[in-house]
Amino acid sequence: MLRILIVDDSARMRSALRLLINTHAGWQVCGEASNGAEGVSAAAQLKPDVAVLDFSMPLMNGVEAAAQIRRLVPEAHLLMFTCYADSPITDAALSAGIETLVAKDEFTKLLRALQQFELAERVAPRP
């Protein structure tokens, strides 16, 4: 089971992602957070396989949260699902440990990225 943490300040987006993820066999939303600081705390507690992070959030943006999650849960895959996927934040996101950036209008690309993380977990599962 691929356990996914959703971190986005939009309740509507979290709901849409939860529906999309939970209808896929073998995937489960293990937690949600509405800002970067809550996302870091949730990741430390839940140890998700994947954290899906927005960039623009209150208290702590997605890049800052990703860097902290990477230190706390180094085995977690980090994906940024954002309106800013083609902007100058790309370099900062990759430096913080984000593996994939997906624009919020590209749900098919999001599904493909999650499938790749699922395959990676099958090949080299966490201890």
Image (tube, grey):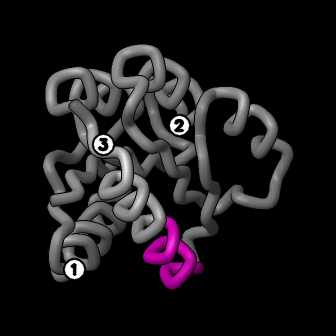
Judged left or right of residue 71, residue 7 is left
Label 2 belongs to which residue? 62
Asked whether the residues under the numbered discs 2 and 3 touch, taking CB atoms below 8 Å apart as contact, a structural biologist would say: no
Judged left or right of residue 2, residue 100 is right
Label 1 belongs to which residue? 24
Residue occupying image coordinates x 77% and y 45%: 90
- Dot 1 or dot 2: first in sequence order is 1
**Magenta segment:** 106-113
Q: Secondary structure at mark 1?
A: loop
Residue 115 in the image: state x and y as whole percent: 41, 70
Local packing at callout 1 (Cα closer than 10 Å; few below 14, some 14-19, many 20+) is: few
Q: Secondary structure at mark 3?
A: loop
> Which secondary structure dominates the residues rendered in magenta?
helix
Quadrant where the N terminus sits is bottom left
Q: CA distance from mark 1 to mark 2?
A: 25 Å
Inspect the image, locate mark 1, and give the three-letter code of the amino acid beneath it.
His
Inspect the image, locate mark 2, and give the three-letter code of the amino acid beneath it.
Gly
Local packing at callout 2 (Cα closer than 10 Å; few below 14, some 14-19, many 20+) is: many
Label 3 belongs to which residue? 34
- Residue furthest out toward the right: 88
Front: mark 3 or 1: 1
- Dot 2 or dot 3: first in sequence order is 3
Residue 112 in the image: state x and y as whole percent: 50, 76
Q: Is residue 9 visible?
A: no
Q: Is residue 18 magenta?
A: no
Front: mark 1 or 2: 1
Query: In the drawing, what numbered circle is on residue 72?
Result: none
Q: CA distance from mark 3 to mark 1?
A: 23 Å
Residue 64 in the image: state x and y as whole percent: 56, 24
